[in-house]
Image: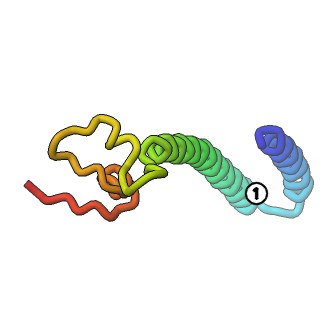
Amino acid sequence: MIEHATDEDAARSARRASLRVLIDRAQDGLNAAEQTALRRHVHDEQHDADMQSAVASDCRVESQALRQRLEQAESATERVRALHRKASHGDTCVYCAHDQRLGYDTTWPCDTIRALDGTLLIADD
């Protein structure tokens, strides 16, 4: 990805250098105001392109960071689901039933799995 961006940057620089040469050659037929306007417009277009390129680069970096965070969250969820699984004998959660805490419902699916699934109703205090 970075190598591709470097190739694009090199191609953009070559095009811009060529454009400057062409503009220099074309100026012979333009008056001073037209020459100034042409140079200003080209400069402004190059500036806009540079800004858009910088924004795109920032978006790629942010996207990569978000993708990494998503993968970490999905991995954490998988680890929790591996702990909180239905027992092979009965309708209890293996992890929750292990501690056998008094007053704690160990029925499958347990509160943890229901929270992950979005089916656990939590009362507001």
Residue pictured at 78% horizontal, 61% vertical:
31
Locate the N terminus by quadrant. Answer: top right
What colour scheme has been applied to the protein in the rendered image? rainbow
Residue pictured at 90% horizontal, 49% vertical:
18
- Which is more toward the observer, 111 or 35? 111
Amino acid at pointer 1: Gln
**Residue underneath mark 1:** 35
Residue 39 position by quadrant? bottom right
Where is residue 102? Give x, y as percent: 16, 41
Is residue 69 at least partly visible in the picture?
no
Where is residue 59? Give x, y as percent: 58, 49
Marker count (numbered): 1
Where is residue 72? Give x, y as percent: 53, 40
Where is residue 77? Give x, y as percent: 47, 46
| Left or right: 76, with 23 as reference point | left
| Left or right: 59, with 77 as reference point | right
- Which is more toward the observer, 57 or 63? 63
- Which is more toward the observer, 51 or 19? 51
- Give the residue furthest to the left: 125
Is residue 89 at least partly visible in the picture?
yes
Q: What element carries label 1?
A: helix
